[in-house]
Image (tube, coloured by chain):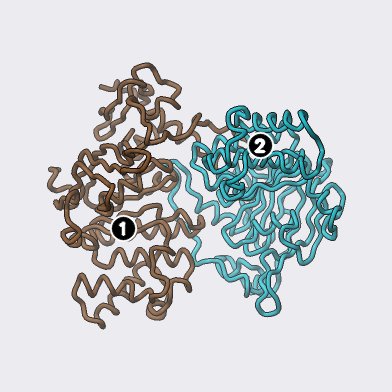
Chain colours: A brown, B cyan
């Protein structure tokens, strides 16, 4: 598939914050792309840059003290450098976002129906009656019981799971082609989390959207995505098909992340693998591999020279490491 | 296996009610369990099920409305003043948010020393040695970090300091309320391993409260599942996870996400949300969402009954637990 047909093409995207302590490269040069009707997972620990990356792709970082370089094309539209007015052409219709906290992403003193209406009336030019009818349809689509009555409810009258459904309905109002979900289920209970993830899956197929799931939880991406991007200290350290990354990862950080998550299938008192230390301070990033200080396989080269992403055996799978784990596929890596 | 050991903690029919009259909410509505010496009991449930309130009621941070709490054979439910403070030295609690549970303007060594100073157990060089020892045990170098302020530490380090503080009085029972849920996975694994090491070293008994089923399974000998203020199932961790007897436990486990692309997808998802504890359903509290509910479930509250040794379930129609 040629690049123009891809829904999202990100190239060398970097977001740098100027702080009192110095420059913070929150996203330090990231490239990936996204097919149509695909679900991509972006995983990483806190501070890995996954949220800043998704907000940069949305074009939500145009404040002072922030420098964005590189390119992010959403359905052909270049987000980097676009003015707010230009970006309004893609917000909602091309790309929409669902944030982590459903309470703070809704206006607490505005009826939920009106919050969905707003996009429909401003962007789609619908009249009041048509917008109301469509909003009720959207509430029904996201599985809110008795949507016509709930239209008049305030966010405070709904539970966390219901609020997140409303946020999803708001995001879907103008039929975006790309839905970015930043930790959409993190504050929710497991049974509600399962409901919301099933809903996102179902909507993706029904509305022919692409979805980017940004999360720290490997369990969320394992069964819900076709491809994964693993981030560490603002960079992609490994990417590939979900199965490839889970079963045939080459980057020691990916393995450490997988092995340190507790599993339901573990027996009680299973010793967990740990990663010594903690994620690096982005203000004082070393010139070599950011993971080197915590890595069991690090050599002198790792501390001096930063590894770039290199292809692994399977097409689409690549990793950034000088001393990768031996391939488990029985095929020699190039 | 549970017959020979002595329970360290025995909780009987514990209820905690907030508010009065028609505004009353029974956050904990009659909970009974034992924790045996040296074991870890995991307490899981969704938000609002009363698991944290149960933990706080054991410490008498919130007052139980009825029921009894016996620690080491002593009923502490009615204790007050000096007797209660004394009892509390045997049990300590670690809270969810590591940063807000430490005073940001105090030095680390003073935070850890506070319980010792309150009780004037040790003084002078012996006290300093004890603090250094506690900090080293949790992986914080006392010489480098002892004089720093709590605000200078990350979440994982703050949780280590909280653990050191809780161990200062050499408690028998440690109540851990969502102690790793605010941490990143790599840090979470460090803290869980540390907890297991310290449990062995100090001979601790743990009540481990968490919503994360995988974390609970990894640390617990036995697990209790709560729903809307009541325990619906309790049993050995392996048996309960492999073959849950209560329909709610089955749904809860089915919703848990395993970090494995080959794990089954959520085919059976629990519909709806928990009812309000202000107006709980009659009979079985889970019946409004249970696919197996009958008229009997609405009329009669199921009492806990044993389905296997040490495995109890409060359900009229428990699922078959024949193990594969």
Q: CA distance from mark 1 to mark 2?
A: 45 Å
Q: Position of residue A38 (x, y in %)?
A: 27, 49
Residue at 79%, 66% (x, y): give it: B66
Extreme residue in the top direction: A300
- The residue tagged with tag 1: helix, strand or loop? strand
Q: Is residue A196 left or right of residue A310?
A: right
Q: Quadrant of the N terminus of chain B?
A: top right
Q: Nearer the viewer, residue A197 or A298?
A: A298
Q: Where is residue A279 shown, x and y percent of the image?
A: 44, 35
Res. B1 visible in picture? no
Residue pointed to by mark 2: B109
Give the number of the disc on residue B197.
none
The residue furthest bottom is: A129
For the C terminus of chain B, the image quarter is top right
Kindly report which numbered mark, 1 or 2, lies closer to the viewer in this rendering.
Answer: 2
Observer able to see residue A43: yes
Mark 1 Cα shell of 10 Å, populated few (<14), some (14-19), many (≥20) = many
Disc 1 sits on a residue from what chain? A
Q: Position of residue A257 (x, y in %)?
A: 45, 35
> Crowding at label 2, few (<14), some or many (≥20) Cα neighbours within 10 Å?
many
The residue under label 1 is A97
Place of residue B26 in the rendered image (x, y in percent of width and height, measured from the top left): 68, 69
The quarter of the displayed image where residue A329 is located: top left
Q: Quadrant of residue A120?
A: bottom left
Give the chain letter at badge 2.
B
Viewer-nearest residue: B14 or A67: A67
As drawn, A58 above or below B16: above
* Residue at the image position 70 percent from the left and 42 percent from the top: B166
Pick the front one: B218 or B113 = B113
For label 2, the SS is helix
């Amino acid at each position: 598939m040629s690049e123009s047909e891809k829904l999202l093409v990100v190239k060398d995207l970097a977001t740098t914050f100027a702080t009192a302590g110095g420059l913070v490269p929150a996203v330090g040069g990231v490239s990936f792309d996204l097919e149509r009707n695909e679900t991509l997972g972006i995983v990483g620990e806190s501070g890995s840059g996954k949220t800043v990356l998704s907000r940069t792709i949305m074009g939500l970082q145009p404040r002072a003290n922030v420098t964005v370089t590189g390119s992010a094309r959403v359905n052909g539209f270049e987000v980097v450098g676009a003015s707010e007015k230009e970006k309004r052409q893609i917000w909602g219709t091309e790309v929409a976002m669902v944030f982590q906290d459903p309470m703070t992403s809704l206006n607490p003193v505005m009826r939920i129906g009106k919050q969905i209406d707003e996009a429909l009336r401003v962007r789609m030019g619908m009249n009041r009656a048509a917008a109301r009818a469509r909003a009720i349809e959207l509430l029904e689509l996201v599985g809110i019981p008795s949507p016509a009555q709930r239209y008049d409810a305030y966010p405070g009258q709904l539970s966390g799971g219901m609020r997140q459904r409303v946020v999803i309905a708001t995001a879907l109002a103008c039929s975006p082609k790309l839905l970015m979900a930043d930790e959409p289920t993190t504050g929710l209970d497991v049974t509600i989390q399962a409901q919301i993830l099933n809903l996102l899956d179902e909507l993706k197929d029904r509305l022919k959207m692409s979805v980017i799931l940004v999360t720290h939880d490997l369990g969320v991406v394992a069964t819900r995505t076709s491809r994964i991007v693993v981030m560490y200290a603002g960079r992609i350290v490994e990417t590939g098909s979900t199965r490839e990354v889970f079963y045939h990862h080459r980057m020691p950080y990916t393995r450490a992340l997988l092995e340190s998550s507790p599993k339901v299938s573990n027996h009680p008192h299973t010793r967990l693998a740990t990663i010594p230390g903690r994620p690096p301070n982005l203000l004082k990033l070393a010139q070599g591999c950011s993971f080197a200080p915590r890595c069991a396989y690090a050599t002198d080269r790792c501390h001096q020279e930063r590894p770039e992403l290199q292809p692994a055996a399977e097409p689409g799978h690549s990793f950034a490491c000088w001393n990768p784990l031996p391939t488990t596929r029985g095929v020699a890596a190039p | 296996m549970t017959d020979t050991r002595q329970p360290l903690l025995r909780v009987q029919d514990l209820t905690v009610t907030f508010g009065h009259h028609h505004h009353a909410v029974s956050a904990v509505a009659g909970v009974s369990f034992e924790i045996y010496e040296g074991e870890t009991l995991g307490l899981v449930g969704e938000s609002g099920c009363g698991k944290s309130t149960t933990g706080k009621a054991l410490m008498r941070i919130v007052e139980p409305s009825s029921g009894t709490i016996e620690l080491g054979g002593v009923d502490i439910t009615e204790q007050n003043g000096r007797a209660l403070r004394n009892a509390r030295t045997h049990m300590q609690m670690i809270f969810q948010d590591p940063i807000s549970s430490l005073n940001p303007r105090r030095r680390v060594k003073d935070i850890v020393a506070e319980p010792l100073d309150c009780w004037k157990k040790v003084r002078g060089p012996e006290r300093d040695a004890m603090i250094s020892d506690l900090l080293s045990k949790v992986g914080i170098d006392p010489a480098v970090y002892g004089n720093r302020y709590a605000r200078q530490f990350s979440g994982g380090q703050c949780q280590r300091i909280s653990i050191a503080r809780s161990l200062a009085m050499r408690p028998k029972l440690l109540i851990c309320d969502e102690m790793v849920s605010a941490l990143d996975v790599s840090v979470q694994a460090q803290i869980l391993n540390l907890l297991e090491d310290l449990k062995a070293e100090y001979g601790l008994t743990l009540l481990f409260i968490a919503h994360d089923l995988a974390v609970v399974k990894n640390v617990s000998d036995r697990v209790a599942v709560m729903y809307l203020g009541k325990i619906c199932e309790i049993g050995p961790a392996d048996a309960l996870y492999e073959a849950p007897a209560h329909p709610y436990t089955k749904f809860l486990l089915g919703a848990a996400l395993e970090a494995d692309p080959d794990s089954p997808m959520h085919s059976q998802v629990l519909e709806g949300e928990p009812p309000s504890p202000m107006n709980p359903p009659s009979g079985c509290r889970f019946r409004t969402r249970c696919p197996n509910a009958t008229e009997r479930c609405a009329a009669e509250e199921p009492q806990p009954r044993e389905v296997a040794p040490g495995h109890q379930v409060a359900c009229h129609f428990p699922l078959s637990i024949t193990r594969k």
